[in-house]
Amino acid sequence: MSNYTYQQIPPAYSEVQQSSIDIPNDPIANQDVFKIDCFVSETDISIRMAFIRKVYSILTMQLLGTVVSAYLVSYNETVKSFFMENPVLLISSFILGLISLITLNFKAKSYPLNVILLSTFTLSESVLVGFIVLNSSATAVFQALVLTLGIFIGLTVFTIQSKYDFSQMGPILMFGIWGLVLLIIVQMFIPFGSAIELGISVFAVFLFSGYIIYDTYMIMNRYTPDDYIIASVSLYLDIINLFIYLLRILDRDQ
């Protein structure tokens, strides 16, 4: 969810030859052909579409890996037993994923390190999701997947078609995240009742739905053309968290 300054001119826009005819005081002639610090929404349509394709292609690959992990744990007894017998994998995946995510925020534009970090982070998250669905029913996992996909597509279409400036949601959503983190910390020491846990899960579903709207708007309007990895990771985290809390609602008994 962080914005990064666009530092390099894309190859296709590296040099534009000056016209030999000087037209003084002509705003079009004196206008920069390409703004170095421009947002995606200010670029040529071909640049914009290439950026969007990159973001959603990366996101698709991330989600496919995570879905495969969830499916195997839910429907394959061998994989499920492996996860249950190796709890150290949970801790190591959490630490590795956290380190990868933090490093990726600083090295998102450093190829090929960014690809390695992205792959490591996605693999770690996929393993964590596998542990999360370990004690859930296969039916609840499937329902949560379908609901998550439906909500994501619906909110994406809504955001793209809307003319509203959703960047204003940022401070509110950040406040909501800190509230959720505080509740999770308190719950570690003071277990909540089922009604409060349900309320927290419903709150989280609305919170991460809001983040899907916010991040989609930022992708279409406020990111720069080389922020495609950070953009895809932002949406990926929104979707994963939405799935987790939908699963908690659908499978409360577990």
Image (cartoon, rainbow, N blue to C red):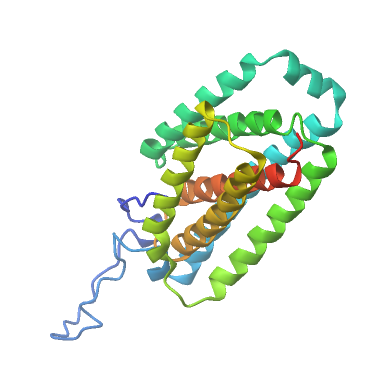
Which quadrant does the C terminus fall into?
top right
From this viewpoint, is residue 236 visible? yes
As drawn, is 103 to the left or to the right of 187?
A: left
Residue 215: x %, y % from top left: 48, 57
As drawn, is 97 to the left or to the right of 126?
A: left
Residue 125: x %, y % from top left: 60, 33
The residue sitting at 74% across, 36% down in the picture is 70
In this rendering, the answer to whether 28 lies above or below 208 is below
Residue 224 quadrant: bottom left
Q: Which of 109 and 25 is in front in this view?
A: 109
Q: Nearer the viewer, residue 53 or 221?
A: 221
As drawn, is 21 to the left or to the right of 198?
A: left
In this rendering, the answer to whether 90 lies above or below 20 is above
Q: Seen from this angle, which residue lies furthest left?
A: 24
Residue 210: x %, y % from top left: 52, 59
The residue sitting at 23% across, 71% down in the picture is 18
